[in-house]
Image (cartoon, coloured by chain):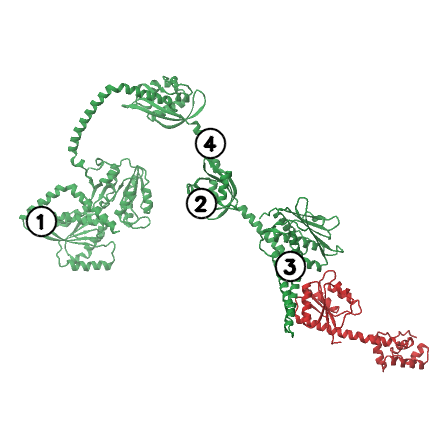
Chain colours: A red, B green
């Protein structure tokens, strides 16, 4: 993954700023894509390669940088954002950082500040992306379970004993044992602890105890 | 100073010479001859040693005169011949003890071995020396003193070896002698200076004159500086004389030689100057009872001779007798027209210029008498012969000329004759009676007749005065009596008369009386009707008064630009008095700067139109510059020629200053308003600048990286630099436009593209609007004509209107807050700029006060925005108006007439 050239997306309504940033980031060895408005960026359909990050101007006509940030957060994955602004104020920057921005740079900014922020953003992107690809793999394994096996899994991760599961499902203890072995095998885990962690990662909720 | 002294001595000597030559030439010659004769056969005379001690220095005429007097008498002695030792002690100037000691040593060395037979001491200090120190040098030698005051004498304890003369000013004689010559004197100027002797003399003089003070006016000038004395004495009334006693110091304490002062004062005086001492004679004084220094010398000489001849000093009386003489300067007697017969009998007249007439008067009279007698006889004979022949025709011709003159004269001519001549010695009353009894009109020309209401002169001839100027009229009685009092002559008497026709006239009267042997024979008179002249004078006076009383300066100059008239208002406005500037070139004392015009342009305007009106800057007398509203008109004389220019000027300096102050205040407020706008706009402005700055920084750093990379990408570097250049320019433009709007400097009037101005302002506030979520739409009409005005002011107006609109949109009044800026041209060809917003509009109760200062609904700002906008609009001959739109929100518009110029 790290052998790929990182891509920086720059959104700024000022042509000079866009051109300057593109030149600087290229010279620093990045791939650069520029957009003159937030809407233009949203309209982009091509898949975002990894690693990548977004350098975003705050004040723009039609849709501001902050509004774009909000829009992107509605998606399953948003790129790390470095905000740049001509005239920033503290409340605005606090808000931006709280909602996950990497940094908030006031124009004109130092090259090292920008590159440091970009580097940070790219690292974060790599981590998040790898996390995403892990959960995707687990999802496939989980998908290979039969409904009965999935059901048994939701019982196992509650920490219930086989006898208890058999009782709850009104099946034999032996049957529970067999299903449980198959689940462990399909999900490639050796212990219940590993199984619980995986289920958590895959977002599988333990069964709700209805109470006796 | 030496020259002066020389001339004084010269004068003094000449005096002596004149006296000798003309006073006693023969006597002197004879006496020389007589005294020379016995010397041949007789024993040689015994030689006597005489020491003469003189108080002062040897350049003072009085001392010299005195010394000469002494020797003159001593040298006449038949018994002795003299060896003189003369010491001028100079003790006025040097009088300290060591000097006296040195003198003593010197005199002791000189005279102890000599046997001094007689000492003559002139003046107090000399006597004092002789009495105190002298005893050791010439013990028991007789001493004759001269010219010592009685009070001084009392200070010394003199023994029987002393006698001499007293110095005494004979005020009585000085006074009487002068008054004998000028019996009509009423005023007496008295000069004695401020030195100690001067004050002493003045005091004595005052004491002496005290009893006469009710009869004469004594004017003491002693305390005045010389300058003022000269001014006074040159301006005395006719019946004044001056008594000059002495002056060594004037009122300023300036030292002067008394005889020199006598000359200066006499030269300046318009009345005769009487003096006190003979040394003044010849300097310019007329003379008077003078202390004679020469006589003092002679008196000392006489006393000395008597002592040498065996008389005892103690037996000889001490007095001042014979030291005051009546002496006069002949030239001054001529100057003041005083004949010698008026002088006291014992007077000595000096400096007399003797003429051939005086030398040979009897011969000349004799010869002339015969010559004249013969001429008279010859003429008498010739004349009577001619008279016999030509008298008749001459008389006829003369009479014809006289008639023609009478008939053609425009002056009224009349003659009053009398049946019998009237004696002028009669009393006024008697003459009055006789005038009416005997008087009648004997001649009158037509001009006279018409002026008194008749048509022909003939009608008046023969009219009795009783009828013509009846006694029943008191006015006539008064004027006839006045006529008699003036010995029947009238000179330029103006009267107001109304005669038969009832019209009142101003008449100028003249009359001459023909008087023979003290009797009035007839009176010739003329009169001129000056009614019209009077009216014209009255009119002129009236106009003059008007001119003097107007509050505007009225100044006229002739064709050479020399001031002819200058009224009171001009004096007040410019500071010069009329008499200071009359006849002077106007450009020489005041500078005139025609605002917006050259002098040539003004002059050619005057030539073309006959007048010019405008504003000028002029300097006052005190150097201050004043603004003047002036109207110049060309003056024409009667022949239509240009005779000058008259200017009517009003001082509008205060008005202009007030205007300047108002403008200054408006500029200041306007500046403050703009600066307060700056605060509001800071965000937008810094954003605007930070954009290109940011790009520049990025490009520069990119370029550095491209150059560091291997291989270098110079193409990219070049492009980066290119962008840096254009972004830098953009930065500069923004800073420039901010300075344009915010700067304090007053911009010049120029051609302005209104659309461009609007765009400049939009640049500044665009970001601010953006961050407030306000959209700004433009509706600018292309190609509108340029306006002529101040760029900064129009920018400010636009900025204020836009900011007001943005303020109005603060809060949630509108879902889509928006501002529209529009430019255009209306039906009147006026240019319009309108700013409208979708805000709440103007509150109903503010709609009337919104254009007033400091009325604001805004939290920021000074509340003077709209006021400034209004004044900017007015300054450009435009109008600012505002109101609410039917669809909601407010609209403000500026209307500017095309091609109109702003006021400043």
Q: Nearer the viewer, mark 3 or mark 2?
A: 2
Where B301 falls versus A110 (above or below)? above
Q: Are marks 2 and 1 in contact (CB under 8 Å)?
A: no
- Between B569 and B229, the residue placed more toward the observer is B569
Check disc 1: other Cα within 10 Å, few if <14, some if 14-19, many if 20+. some
Q: Which residue is mark 2?
A: B587
Check disc 3: other Cα within 10 Å, few if <14, some if 14-19, many if 20+. few
Q: Is residue B170 something that shows in the picture?
A: yes
In the image, are marks 3 and 4 on the same chain? yes
Which of the 4 image quadrants contains residue B766? bottom right
Left or right position of B560 against B596: left
Q: Position of residue B631 (x, y in %)?
A: 51, 40
- Between B311 and B819, the residue placed more toward the observer is B819
Q: What secondary structure is found at the residue carrying circle 4?
A: helix
Question: Callout 3: residue from which chain?
Answer: B
Left or right position of B784 against B339: right
Q: Position of residue B289 (x, y in %)?
A: 23, 42
Q: What secondary structure is found at the residue carrying circle 1?
A: loop
Q: Which residue is mark 1?
A: B79
Left or right position of B375 against B492: left
**Mark 3 to mark 2: distance in Å?**
54 Å
Q: Which residue is mark 4?
A: B539
Q: Position of residue B375 (x, y in %)?
A: 19, 27
Check disc 2: other Cα within 10 Å, few if <14, some if 14-19, many if 20+. few
Dot placed on the residue nearer the N-terminal end, 3 or 2: 2
Where B900 falls versus B761 (above or below)? above
Q: Are marks 4 and 1 in contact (CB under 8 Å)?
A: no
Identify the mark at residue B679; answer none if there is no mark.
3
Question: Callout 2: residue from which chain?
Answer: B
Which of the 4 image quadrants contains residue A94? bottom right
Q: Are marks 3 and 4 in contact (CB under 8 Å)?
A: no
Question: Callout 4: residue from which chain?
Answer: B
């Amino acid at each position: 993954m790290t052998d790929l050239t990182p891509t920086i997306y720059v959104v700024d309504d000022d042509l000079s700023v866009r051109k300057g940033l593109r030149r600087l980031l290229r010279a620093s060895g990045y791939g650069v894509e520029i957009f003159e408005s937030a809407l233009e960026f949203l309209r982009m359909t091509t898949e975002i390669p990894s690693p990548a990050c977004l350098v975003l101007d705050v004040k723009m006509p039609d849709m501001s940088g902050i509004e774009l940030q909000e829009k992107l957060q509605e998606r399953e994955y948003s790129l790390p954002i470095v905000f740049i602004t001509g005239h920033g104020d503290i409340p605005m920057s606090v808000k931006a950082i709280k909602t996950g921005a990497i940094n908030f740079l006031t124009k004109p900014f130092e090259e090292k500040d920008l590159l440091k922020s970009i580097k940070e953003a790219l690292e974060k992107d790599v981590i998040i992306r790898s996390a995403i690809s892990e959960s995707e793999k687990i999802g496939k394994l989980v998908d290979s379970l039969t409904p009965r096996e999935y059901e048994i899994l939701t019982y196992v991760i509650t920490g219930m004993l086989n006898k208890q599961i058999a009782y709850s499902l009104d099946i034999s203890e032996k049957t529970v044992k067999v299903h449980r072995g198959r689940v462990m095998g399909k999900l490639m885990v050796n212990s219940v602890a590993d199984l619980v962690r995986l289920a958590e990662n895959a977002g599988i909720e333990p069964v709700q105890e209805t109470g006796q | 100073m030496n020259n002066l002294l020389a001339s004084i001595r010269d004068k003094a000597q000449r005096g002596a010479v004149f006296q000798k030559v003309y006073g006693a030439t023969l006597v002197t010659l004879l006496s020389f001859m007589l005294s020379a004769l016995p010397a041949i056969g007789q024993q040689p005379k015994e030689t006597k040693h005489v020491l003469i001690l003189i108080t002062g220095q040897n350049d003072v005429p009085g001392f010299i005169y005195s010394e000469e007097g002494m020797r003159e008498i001593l040298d006449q002695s038949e018994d002795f011949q003299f060896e003189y030792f003369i010491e001028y002690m100079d003790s006025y100037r040097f009088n300290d003890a060591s000097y006296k000691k040195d003198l003593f040593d010197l005199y002791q060395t000189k005279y102890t071995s000599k046997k001094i037979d007689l000492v003559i001491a002139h003046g107090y200090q000399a006597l004092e020396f002789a009495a105190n120190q002298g005893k050791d040098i010439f013990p028991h030698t007789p001493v004759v003193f001269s010219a010592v005051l009685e009070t001084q004498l009392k200070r010394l304890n003199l023994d029987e070896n002393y006698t001499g003369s007293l110095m005494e000013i004979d005020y009585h004689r000085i006074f009487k002698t002068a008054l004998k010559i000028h019996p009509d004197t009423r005023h007496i100027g008295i000069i004695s200076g401020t030195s100690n002797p001067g004050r002493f003399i003045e005091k004595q003089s005052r004491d002496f004159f005290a009893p006469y003070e009710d009869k004469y006016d004594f004017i003491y000038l002693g305390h005045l500086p010389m300058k003022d004395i000269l001014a006074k004495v040159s301006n005395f009334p006719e019946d004044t004389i001056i008594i000059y006693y002495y002056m060594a110091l004037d009122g300023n304490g300036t030292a002067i030689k008394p005889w020199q002062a006598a000359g200066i004062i006499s030269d300046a005086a318009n009345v005769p100057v009487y003096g006190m001492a003979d040394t003044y004679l010849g300097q310019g004084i007329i003379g008077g009872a003078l202390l004679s220094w020469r006589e003092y010398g002679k008196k000392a000489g006489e006393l000395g001779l008597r002592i040498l001849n065996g008389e005892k000093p103690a037996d000889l009386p001490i007095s001042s007798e014979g030291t005051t003489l009546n002496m006069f300067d002949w030239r001054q007697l001529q100057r003041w027209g005083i004949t010698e017969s008026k002088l006291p009998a014992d007077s000595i007249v000096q400096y007399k210029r003797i003429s051939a007439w005086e030398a040979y008067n009897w011969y000349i009279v004799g010869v002339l008498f015969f010559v004249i007698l013969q001429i008279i006889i010859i003429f008498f004979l010739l004349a009577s012969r001619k008279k016999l022949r030509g008298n008749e025709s001459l008389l006829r011709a003369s009479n014809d000329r006289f008639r023609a003159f009478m008939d053609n004269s425009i002056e009224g001519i009349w003659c009053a004759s009398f049946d019998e001549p009237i004696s002028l010695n009669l009393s006024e009353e008697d003459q009055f009676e006789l005038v009416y009894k005997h008087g009648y009109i004997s001649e009158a020309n037509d001009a006279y007749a018409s002026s008194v209401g008749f048509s022909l002169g003939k009608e008046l001839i023969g009219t009795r005065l009783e009828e013509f100027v009846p006694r029943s009229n008191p006015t006539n009685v008064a004027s006839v009596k006045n006529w008699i009092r003036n010995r029947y002559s009238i000179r330029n008497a103006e009267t107001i008369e109304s005669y038969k026709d009832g019209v009142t006239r101003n008449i100028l009267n003249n009359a001459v009386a023909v008087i023979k042997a003290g009797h009035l024979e007839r009176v010739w008179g003329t009169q001129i009707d000056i009614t019209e002249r009077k009216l014209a004078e009255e009119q002129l006076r009236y106009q003059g008064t008007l001119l003097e009383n107007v509050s505007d300066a009225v100044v006229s100059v002739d064709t050479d630009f020399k001031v002819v008239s200058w009224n009171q208002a001009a004096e007040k406005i410019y500071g010069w008095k009329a008499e200071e500037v009359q006849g002077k070139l106007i450009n020489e004392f005041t500078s005139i700067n025609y605002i917006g015009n050259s002098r040539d342009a003004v002059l050619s305007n005057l030539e073309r139109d006959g007048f010019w009106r405008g504003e000028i800057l002029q300097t006052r007398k005190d150097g201050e510059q004043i603004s003047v509203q002036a109207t110049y008109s060309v003056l024409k004389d009667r022949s239509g020629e240009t005779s000058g220019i008259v200017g009517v000027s009003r001082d509008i300096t205060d008005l202009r200053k007030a205007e300047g102050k108002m403008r200054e205040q408006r500029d200041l407020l306007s500046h403050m308003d703009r600066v307060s706008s700056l605060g509001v706009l800071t965000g937008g402005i810094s954003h605007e600048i930070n954009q290109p700055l940011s790009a520049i920084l990025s490009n520069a750093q990119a370029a550095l990286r491209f150059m560091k990379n291997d291989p270098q990408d110079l193409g990219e570097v070049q492009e980066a630099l290119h962008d840096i250049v254009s972004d830098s320019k953009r930065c500069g433009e923004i800073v420039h436009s901010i300075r344009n709007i915010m700067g304090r400097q007053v911009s010049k009037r120029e051609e302005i593209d209104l659309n461009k101005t609007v765009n400049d302002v939009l640049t500044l506030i665009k970001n601010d609007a953006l961050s407030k979520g306000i959209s700004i739409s433009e509706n600018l009409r292309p190609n509108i004509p340029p306006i002529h005005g101040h760029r900064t002011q129009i920018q400010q107006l636009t900025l204020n209107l836009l900011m007001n609109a943005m303020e109005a949109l603060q809060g949630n009044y509108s879902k889509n807050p928006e501002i529209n800026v529009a430019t255009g041209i209306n039906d009147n060809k006026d240019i319009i700029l309108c700013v409208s917003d979708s805000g709440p509009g103007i509150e109903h109760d503010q709609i009337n006060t919104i254009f007033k200062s400091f009325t604001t609904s805004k939290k920021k700002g000074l509340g003077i925005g709209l006021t400034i906008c209004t004044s900017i609009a007015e300054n450009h001959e435009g109008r600012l108006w505002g109101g609410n739109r039917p669809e909601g929100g407010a609209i403000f518009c500026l209307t500017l007439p095309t091609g109109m110029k702003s006021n400043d």
